Image (spheres, grey):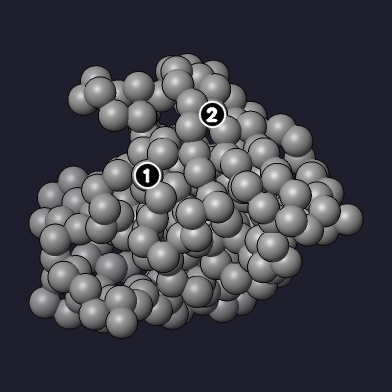
Amino acid sequence: EEQLVESGGGLVQPGGSLRLSCAASGLSFSSYWMNWIRQAPGKGLEWVANINEEGSEKKYVDSVKGRFTISRDNAKNSVTLQMNSLRADDTAVYYCGTDKVRGGTVDIWGKGTTVIVSA
Amino acid sequence: DIVMTQTPLSSPVTLGQPASISCRSSQSLVHSDGNIYLTWLQQRPGQPPRLLIYKNSNRFSGVPDRFSGSGAGTDFTLKITRVEAEDVGVYYCMQAAQFPPTFGQGTKLEIK
C-alpha cells in the first residue's frame, strides 16, 4: 500500500523551530516531486513548498521563504521540512503529498501532523 | 498569484440528486505544454484531502464515475450525478498552471 506518514509536529513558541518529516512506503519515492501543504484550523488549504526528484529544485510560497527549508533523502524515502522563525500564523496541520500521476496535483496525501505556534 | 474562486461556498443537496460546484480562476489555466492543471479535491470531516480529478477532467484511480470535471480557460465545474451520503465534505479546486499552486476557498457539500 502506498503510504505517507508525517511526524514531528508539536507546540512551539513564536520564533522557535520545528522539523517535520514525511516517510514514504509502497511507492518509488525517488521518482516523484514531493510537496508540503498546510491547513490552518478551520481554514482552507495552502501549498507551502515542493522539491523535485533529485532534490536539486526547491520552491516555496512567499510567506515561508527564508524561514522554511525542504529537503529529501531518497535512500531513506523521506522528505523533511525544517521550519525556523515560526510565527502564530504558521499554526496548521501540515500534509505531505506526492504527484505520481504527474498532473500538477497531489494524489497521495499523508494524514498530517499538527504544528501549534503559541506562547 | 492566480486567485481561485469557488461557488457556492455551501451546497445543501438531497440524496440521489445532482450537485455542481464552480471554480473560476483569475487567469487562464492552460499551461504552455497545452495541459489544463486544474485539480478537484474532496476533504471529508476529520480526514486529509483526497484527489478526485486532475488535469481538469481525469478521474483519479478508485474515484466513482459519478464524479466528473470539465471546463476551459478560466471556468471549471465539478459535477456529481447522484449525491450519496459519503460525499459530504468540503471540495477544493486547485491550480498548478502557474507558480505557486493555489486553492479555492472550499465548498461545503451537505445533505438536506
Q: Which residue is mark 1?
A: B58
Say which amino acid is labelled 1. Asn
* Disc 1 crowd, CA 10 A, few/some/many (<14, 14-19, 20+): some
**Chain identifier of the residue bearing label 2 in the image:** B
Q: Is residue B91 visible?
A: yes
Tag shown at residue B76: 2
Residue A11 position within the rendered picture, expressed as x and y whole percent measured from the top left: 61, 76
Which quadrant does the N terminus of chain A fall into?
bottom left
Q: Residue at x 45, y 18 (%)?
A: B73
| Relative to B8, residue B75 above or below | above
| Relative to B41, residue A14 above or below | below
**Chain identifier of the residue bearing label 1 in the image:** B
Q: Residue at x 79, y 45 (%)?
A: B11
Say which amino acid is labelled 2. Phe
Residue B39 position within the rendered picture, expressed as x and y whole percent measured from the top left: 45, 43
Q: CA distance from mark 2 to mark 1?
A: 13 Å
Nearer to us in this view, A67 or A2 = A2
Residue B28 position within the rendered picture, expressed as x and y whole percent measured from the top left: 43, 18
* Disc 2 crowd, CA 10 A, few/some/many (<14, 14-19, 20+): many
Specify whether B82 is left or right of A50: right
Mark 2 secondary-structure assignment: strand
**Figure quadrant of residue B36:** top left
Specify whether A78 is left or right of B83: left
